[in-house]
Image (cartoon, grey):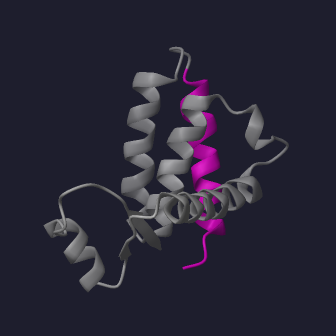
Amino acid sequence: MIIGITGGSGSGKTTLLKLLEEQGILKVEYDFDKETTAEKQKEVVDKVDEVIKNSLVNYKLNRLSYVDRAIIRMATAEMMMGTAVAVVINEALEIVKIYSDQGDGNAVRFINKVLDNVSKNIER
């Protein structure tokens, strides 16, 4: 996965970014052209959304709440970068419990199923 870094005065890579790059998990491109960076970010979101769309059963991406969509996108991107599936799903569900679930467990069960489908659809 390629990410674009934009910014001001700082030019150094963080230790985490260096480590991810060294392991071949992530390629970091420093690009201070805002238009180009926005296009790259859009490409990444489009790829993530395509995986999610292929993982939804009888449901459309635009029907998801903004919070659920953001959590699923974040988890999908992490899985696409190679983070352990069980870890990603567990962390995502903990976030759902705090920010999305209404106390009945429906959101947790739904997002768990979606992320399970996502994990099966990601090309590894």
Query: Above or below — where is 103 with respect to 117?
Result: above
Would residue 44 be counted in the magenta stretch? no
When asked about the image quadrant of residue 4, the answer is bottom left
Left-right relation of 14 to 116: left
Q: Nearer the viewer, residue 16 or 72?
A: 16
Residue at the location (61% across, 59% down)?
48
Q: Nearer the viewer, residue 65 or 87?
A: 65
Would residue 120 be counted in the magenta stretch? yes
Residue at the location (40% across, 46% down)?
90
Left-right relation of 43 to 103: right
Residue at the location (14% across, 68% down)?
15
When asked about the image quadrant of residue 5, the answer is bottom left
Rendering coords of residue 65 (x, y %): 65, 28
Rendering coords of residue 122 (x, y %): 60, 70
Instruction: Residue at the far right: name it.
Output: 58
Left-right relation of 65 to 22: right
Q: Quadrant of the C terminus?
A: bottom right
Rendering coords of residue 91 (x, y %): 37, 44
Query: Above or below — where is 37 with respect to 67?
Result: below
Instruction: Residue at the far top: name it.
Output: 103
The number of callouts visible is 0
- Predominant secondary structure, magenta span: helix
Which portion, as a residue range, is magenta? 105-124
Rendering coords of residue 94 (x, y %): 38, 35
Residue at the location (63% across, 46% down)?
113
